[in-house]
Amino acid sequence: MECFDVHTHVQFPAYDADREEVIRRAKAAGVKMIAVGTQAASSEAAIVLSRAFPGEVWATVGFHPNHTSSAWYHDSKEQGGGVRETFDGALMERLARESEVVAIGECGLDYFRLPLDGDEAIKEKEEQRKVFREHISLAQKLGKPLMLHCRPSGKTDDAYEDLLQLIIDNQKITIPKILHFYVGSLEMTKKFLEAGFYFTLGGVITFTHDYDEMVKLLPIDRILLETDAPYVAPAPHRGKRNEPSFILETARKVAELKGLEYDTVLRSTAKNTRTLFGI
């Protein structure tokens, strides 16, 4: 039975030594994947990879909110070089028009490394919002879903609240809105459900009980599965580099928490994926 990892980064340098082996292991496990771009270089690499593995890998194009910030740092798992990219809307649109691209993102808001308050915080948040609005416009223009990244500053829902308000303020949005690696509060989850969002669940739900009630609340027709590989490997792979074949552990945990058959979770999330992304 097929399963989809809707948010992975197998095009990143973290897989340069064994990328084909990782994809073969995923295929053997019945796992197909969407390689998610975080800037122009990784978006283009995702497209190249999807062309090398048609019917197994698809791509997204986006600019991660951390790359708009002065708090940017070089993640060697993501980038081979240490030069910060700047957002280029024209280039992003050119890449997004490729047939292998099934969504726009990851894009959104990330307050985790920003100053908590003051003029600098206001400036950084507005720059993130500006770039996010361009992604929203591009997604609407091309009729492709939004793959959303949203990370609050701490234990509050601040970034989630701001992202939801930006979506609500833009009345023209008709494309699907997918919250990647969702870990919001129950109150926030109810707001997003009411607004029609979809949610991807990752490996974190396998090694903490913090999100059990949130997973139970989500209807199965709003759930997708992801690894966010190479990050946050699920139990029993904690401490290892994550990879798409590990997604099955997350599927098992979703089945356990929701009291569903494992096969039901695979079928439902695969159907959701194919419907939302037009795969």
Image (cartoon, grey):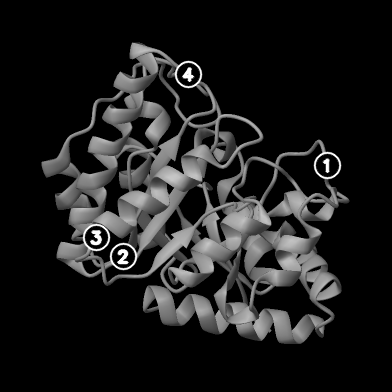
Please give the label number shown on residue 100.
Answer: 2
Work out how far the residue at label 3 is from the one at label 4, CA to CA, in angstroms. 27 Å
Task: First in sequence, mark 3 or 4: give its number.
Answer: 4
Work out which quarter of the rendered image holds the N terminus and state it.
Answer: bottom right
Note whether 84 is above or below 31 in the view shown: above
Work out how far the residue at label 3 is from the one at label 1, CA to CA, in angstroms. 35 Å
Work out how far the residue at label 3 is from the one at label 2, CA to CA, in angstroms. 15 Å
Q: Of 118 and 174, which appears nearest the observer?
A: 118
Task: First in sequence, mark 4 or 1: give its number.
Answer: 4
Work out how far the residue at label 2 is from the one at label 4, CA to CA, in angstroms. 28 Å
Task: First in sequence, mark 3 or 2: give its number.
Answer: 2
Instruction: From the image, tell me which residue sits under label 3.
Output: 139
- Do the residues bearing badges 2 and 4 touch, measured as CB atoms within 8 Å? no
**Residue 47 in sight from this viewpoint:** no
Q: Look at label 4 and name its amino acid.
A: His
**Residue 57 in sight from this viewpoint:** yes
| Residue 64: quarter of image | top left
Note whether 243 is above or below 109 in the view shown: below
Q: Look at label 1 and name its amino acid.
A: Arg
Instruction: From the image, tell me which residue sits under label 1.
Output: 238
| Residue 259: quarter of image | bottom right
Task: Please identify, in this view, whether the residue under mark 2 or under mark 1 is nearer the observer.
Answer: 1
Q: Look at label 2 and name its amino acid.
A: Glu
Q: Residues within 10 Å of mark 2 (few under 14, many from 20)?
A: many
Work out how far the residue at label 4 is from the one at label 1, CA to CA, in angstroms. 23 Å
Work out which quarter of the rendered image holds the C terminus and state it.
Answer: bottom left
